[in-house]
Amino acid sequence: MSVQGHLEELKRRHRSLERQIEIELVRPSSSDQHLQELKRKKLLLKDEISKLQNGKVVLAV
């Protein structure tokens, strides 16, 4: 997979996690632990996206 293709996939996954977080925030029965895990994954993706955009080598998440 090209770097650009990988970057687009990471951005897609980041948007998906954002939607999941928004859904969890409005659900009355949402788990704080689950919400924190989603946020952690989103942050890891954001870091990897940033590193790729800046031309740094990163490991896949």
Image: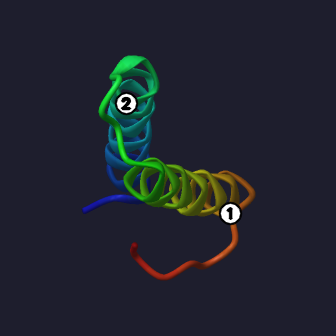
**Residue type, mark 1 in image:** Lys
Mark 1: give few (<14), some (14-19) or many (20+) Cα within 10 Å: few
Position above or below: 53 against 55: above
Distance between mark 2 and mark 1 Cα atoms: 28 Å
Residue located farthest toward the top when viewing the structure as drawn: 26
**Residue type, mark 2 in image:** Glu
The residue nearer to you, when weighing 44 against 29, is 29
Kind of element beneath mark 2 = helix
Residue located farthest toward the right when viewing the structure as drawn: 54
Mark 2: give few (<14), some (14-19) or many (20+) Cα within 10 Å: some
Q: Where residue 45 sits in the image (x, y, percent)? A: 51, 56
Reading the image, the residue beneath label 2 is 24
Reading the image, the residue beneath label 1 is 51
The image quadrant that residue 15 belongs to is top left
Q: Quadrant of the C terminus?
A: bottom left
Position above or below: 21 against 22: below
Left or right of 27 in this view: 56 = right
Q: Where residue 43 sits in the image (x, y, percent)? A: 60, 55
Total tally of numbered discs in the picture: 2
Residue sitting at 30 percent across and 33 percent down? 29
Q: Where residue 23 sits in the image (x, y, percent)? A: 34, 22
Left or right of 29 in this view: 15 = right
State if disc 1 and disc 2 touch (CB < 8 Å).
no
Residue sitting at 53 percent across and 50 percent down? 39
Q: Nearer the viewer, mark 2 or mark 1?
A: 2
Residue located farthest toward the front when viewing the structure as drawn: 29
Q: Earlier in the sequence, mark 2 or mark 1?
A: 2
The residue nearer to you, when weighing 57 against 41, is 41
Kind of element beneath mark 1 = helix
The colour mode here is rainbow
